[in-house]
Image: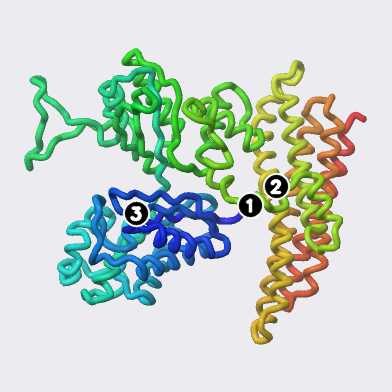
């Protein structure tokens, strides 16, 4: 499964369309990057861009955008309402899927080093990337803003992490840039059946991490020894919130920033608002997502509500997410379009890949004179079909009369089958990508060709090895549903076994045809032996499945 990160750079220009378009084009021309949003503000004279993609592509896109901004934006003439320190004021790197925060920290440092060295721009690291505790907070770095940058650079305490530490004509034009890794921020509004802003804010005070000012028995605000206000924290960690009235909707809302959705996910925040609203005699009528959201946040919400219903969470992704959309009331203000609001679905490039084709279109592509997709992609598809059938039989067993004792096994099985299905669907395209990498390696310069081809061949073996392993896991599930599942679905369990075996055998063939091409014979012999062992397991499981069917 591919890694995905998000970059949300803020540029100190919100009026000049030529400049804004040039920055967007600099990002968009980088292969593998998808620009999701451009949000300019004339009063703040500032524009926020949102783009996503695989890490290396995103870092390249960020560098090109920072370079273009430094060419076109002159900070010595800049005026705007928003705090800022440079042409590219801040450039956050955010993990979205299959990427850790530690990886994003390294990506941010790589970007910062390149910006400092190649563009001559002072770079400060912030957030999780910060070199000191003081620099974690963006506001601390921005203190004094662009106008105070010369003084800041003269202070040894504020030496940049990368780039020049002295003020010069170049830095006078570009200012400094703040780069770092941070958590994905979700902006989420909760709708109330009232127009009373005070009631909405009362709920916000109760739930937000910062809470409210503590008061003594006389109602006076309590201060500590240094004169600072003592706070009573709210119930939710990593949440900021206020209450407001939106004239356009004629309703009050609790407006929340979920600063770390891994700590407080959206569904938990909404449920807490529902609880606090009920204490005031109010009802949460729906919610509103501002911007986009990672798929896993919506998947977790869907699973939460399915489990509350007593159902298995082992359904297709879109079904799980639609459950979340309905449960959270996300359609109240406007239609919640999954393909526009969920980051992974909003990436156009992926929607054009093999796994998103119709059955007819996939078979047409398969039957053309192109060498890819081929048997490897079909093997992965067979594995996905096997896992899908396992999930189906599990669902048709759960809650059925006479199968009460099987429910505890079938509920987690259905969910595991969906995970296998997703991974195998991803492998449909990964196999074709691996084949294309071998073709590309053949066109590499002669001095690089041997090493590049060896690496590409190992990649072309890694994908079918993963399919082979996943197919064995699917066959294990098929054995369970064949033995314990609804007997009316015996033929479906049998086909799950057949398609699982086809996936394993097809993947084995792809390993065997590529292994002899490797120069590294030790690696080739070991991988061939491992593949044979997995195939033996697959054949044994398929035979056991066939033997257990009452057909």
- Name of the residue lying farthest toward the top: 281
Counting the numbered discs, the total is 3
Decide: few, some or many residues near mark 2? Use Cα within 10 Å; few <14, some 14-19, many ≥20. few
Place of residue 157 in the rendered image (x, y in percent of width and height, measured from the top left): 18, 67
The residue tagged 3 is 14
Place of residue 77 in the rendered image (x, y in percent of width and height, measured from the top left): 24, 64
Place of residue 418 in the rendered image (x, y in percent of width and height, measured from the top left): 67, 39
- What is the C-alpha distance between the residues marked 3 and 1? 31 Å
The residue located at (31%, 59%) in the rendering is 89
Q: Earlier in the sequence, mark 2 or mark 1?
A: 1
Assign a secondary structure to mark 2: helix
Q: Earlier in the sequence, mark 2 or mark 3?
A: 3
The residue located at (58%, 34%) in the rendering is 321
- Tell me the quarter of the picture where residue 311 sits: top right
Q: Which mark is residue 405?
A: none
Q: Is residue 539 above or below residue 11?
A: above
The residue tagged 1 is 350
Assign a secondary structure to mark 3: loop
Decide: few, some or many residues near mark 1? Use Cα within 10 Å; few <14, some 14-19, many ≥20. few
Q: Earlier in the sequence, mark 3 or mark 1?
A: 3
- Disc number lying in front (2 or 3): 3
- What is the C-alpha distance between the residues marked 2 and 1? 8 Å
Do the numbered discs 2 and 1 sit on residues whose CB atoms are within 8 Å? Answer: yes
User: Left or right: where does residue 501 sit relative to residue 140?
Assistant: right
- What is the C-alpha distance between the residues marked 2 and 3? 37 Å
- Disc number lying in front (3 or 1): 3
The residue located at (34%, 40%) in the rendering is 238
Looking at the image, which is closer to me, 481 or 66?
66
Q: Which mark is residue 356?
A: 2
Q: Is residue 260 above or below residue 393?
A: below
């Amino acid at each position: 499964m591919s890694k995905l990160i998000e970059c949300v750079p803020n540029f100190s220009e919100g009026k000049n369309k030529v400049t804004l378009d040039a920055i967007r084009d600099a990002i968009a021309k980088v292969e593998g990057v998808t620009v999701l949003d451009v949000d300019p503000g004339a009063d703040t004279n500032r524009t926020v861009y949102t783009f996503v993609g695989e890490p290396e592509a995103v870092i390249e896109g960020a560098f090109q955008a920072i370079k273009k901004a430094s060419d076109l934006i002159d900070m010595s003439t800049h005026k705007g309402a928003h705090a800022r320190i440079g042409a590219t004021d801040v450039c956050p790197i955010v993990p979205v899927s299959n990427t850790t925060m530690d990886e994003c920290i390294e990506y941010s440092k790589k970007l910062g080093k390149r910006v400092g060295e190649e563009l001559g721009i002072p770079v400060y690291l912030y957030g999780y990337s910060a070199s000191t505790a003081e620099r974690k907070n963006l506001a601390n770095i921005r203190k004094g803003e662009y106008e105070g940058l010369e003084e800041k650079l003269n202070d040894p305490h504020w030496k940049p992490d990368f780039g020049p530490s002295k003020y010069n004509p170049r830095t006078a034009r570009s200012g400094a840039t703040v780069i770092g890794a941070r958590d994905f921020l979700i902006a989420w509004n909760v709708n109330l059946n009232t127009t009373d802003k005070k009631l909405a804010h009362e709920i916000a005070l109760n739930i937000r991490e910062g809470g409210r000012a503590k008061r003594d028995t006389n109602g006076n605000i309590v201060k500590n020894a240094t004169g600072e206000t003592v706070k009573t924290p709210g119930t939710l960690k990593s949440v900021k919130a206020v209450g407001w009235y939106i004239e356009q909707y004629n309703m009050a809302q609790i407006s929340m920033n979920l600063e770390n959705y891994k700590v407080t996910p959206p569904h938990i925040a909404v449920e807490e608002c529902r609880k606090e609203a009920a204490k005031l005699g109010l009802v949460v009528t729906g919610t509103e997502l501002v911007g986009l959201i990672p798929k896993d946040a919506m998947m977790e919400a869907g699973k939460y509500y399915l489990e509350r219903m007593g159902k298995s969470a082992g359904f297709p992704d879109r079904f799980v997410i639609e459950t979340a959309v309905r449960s959270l009331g996300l359609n109240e203000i406007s239609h919640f379009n999954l393909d526009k609001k969920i980051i992974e679905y909003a990436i156009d490039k992926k929607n054009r890949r093999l796994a998103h084709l119709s059955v007819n279109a996939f078979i047409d592509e398969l039957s053309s004179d192109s060498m890819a997709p081929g048997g490897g992609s079909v093997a992965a598809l067979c594995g996905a079909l096997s896992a899908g059938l396992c999930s189906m039989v599990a669902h048709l067993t759960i809650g059925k009369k006479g199968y009460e004792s099987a429910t505890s096994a079938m509920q987690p099985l259905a969910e595991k089958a969906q995970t296998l299905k997703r991974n195998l669907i991803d492998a449909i395209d990964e196999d074709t990508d691996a084949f294309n990498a071998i073709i590309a390696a053949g066109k590499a310069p002669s001095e690089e060709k041997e090493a590049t081809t060896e690496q590409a061949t190992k990649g072309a073996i890694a994908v079918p090895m993963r399919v082979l392993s996943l197919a064995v896991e699917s066959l294990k599930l098929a054995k369970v549903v064949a033995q314990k599942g609804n007997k009316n679905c015996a033929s479906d369990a049998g086909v799950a076994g057949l398609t699982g075996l086809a996936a394993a055998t097809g993947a084995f063939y792809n390993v065997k045809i590529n292994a002899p091409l490797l120069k590294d014979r030790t690696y080739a012999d070991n991988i061939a032996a491992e593949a044979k062992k997995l195939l033996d397991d697959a054949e044994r499981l398929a035979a056991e499945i066939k033997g257990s069917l009452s057909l």
